[in-house]
Amino acid sequence: MRICIAAETIDLCRMMSDTIKDISENTTIEIWDDPTALFHRASYSDWDYVIIETADEDEAVRLSERVSELSPQTGIMVIADDDRRAYEALQAHVQSYLVKPVSADQISKEYRYYVERRKALEKESERHNNKTLSICRKKGGDCLVDGVPVRFHRNKTRDLINHLAKNSGTMVSDKELLMTLWGKDDESTKSYLRSIKAEMVNLFKETGNDDAIVKQRGRIGILMDRLQ
């Protein structure tokens, strides 16, 4: 497991690091004493879990959104001074939002939950791995796994996949997707887009086709020739 702890409080940082090391073996922990510096990272895919502690809740939400956008599979914990921005953080797919002061028991409980959930998802992924994923563009972008239509949590996920399939090999910008799928660009649609992108990426990963997804900051695409 690869963990990043970005905290302004060094004592809290050490406590979190010690707590996680006691839970997980073979864990690599990277510590940053400036959460703001994380915002300029090009990618977060080299971390499995990110813990953000900062007195600036707005910064915590912005950073959480960036992590979830570039690496939907990365788990996120936010530790804040109050719960004013808890709803926005959860909209950014933060798994845990804790209000200070926090204890080692709280950190342990939240992290253990993440680890157990990750194991369950990996086991489920093994059941589906290497299954045939196909996109029937003539039927409006229906996705089939071993010939069975996929039931998405959000209908817009199907629309997203259909649009990207038509642009095979070309990465499409978030702005284009927002205008194509909703006809507007605001905070609500941006949040919805992050959710359906995450659902799409998880589908491709669970069927062993994650190499067909290509992305950069603010752009994503599907390489149709890589689907089985």
Image (spheres, helix red, strand yellow):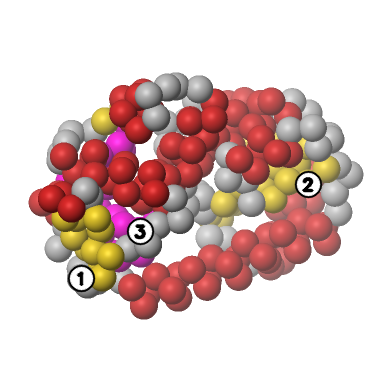
Mark 3 residue crowding within 10 angstroms, few (<14) / some (14–19) / many (20+): many
The answer for how far apart the CA atoms under marks 2 and 1 are is: 43 Å
For the question of whether residue 205 can be seen, the reply is no
Q: Is residue 203 visible?
A: yes
- In the current view of this chain or complex, which residue is farthest to the left? 225
Residue at which label 2 appears: 98
Seen from the viewer's position, the closer of residues 126 and 29 is 126
Which residue is located at x 58 percent, y 45 percent? Answer: 93
103 w.r.t. 193: above or below: below
Q: Residue at x 23, y 40 (%)?
A: 164
Viewer-side label of 2, 1: 1
Q: Out of 205 and 27, give the one closest to the viewer.
A: 205
- Circle 1 crowding by C-alpha within 10 Å: few under 14, some 14–19, many from 20: few
Residue 134 pos. (x, y %): 18, 60
- Label 2: few (<14), some or many (≥20) within 10 Å? some
Task: Mark 1 vs mark 3: give the one in front.
Answer: 1
Q: Which residues are magenta?
A: 202-223
Q: With 219 as the anchor, is 83 left or right in this view?
A: right
**Horizontally, is 79 left or right of 37 in the view?**
right
Determine the secondary structure under disc 1: loop
* SS at mark 2 in the image: strand
Can you tell which mark lies on residue 203?
A: 3
- As shown in the figure, which amino acid type bears the numbered disc 1? Gly
Out of 183 and 89, give the one closest to the viewer.
Answer: 183
Q: Residue 147 shows which numbered tag?
A: 1
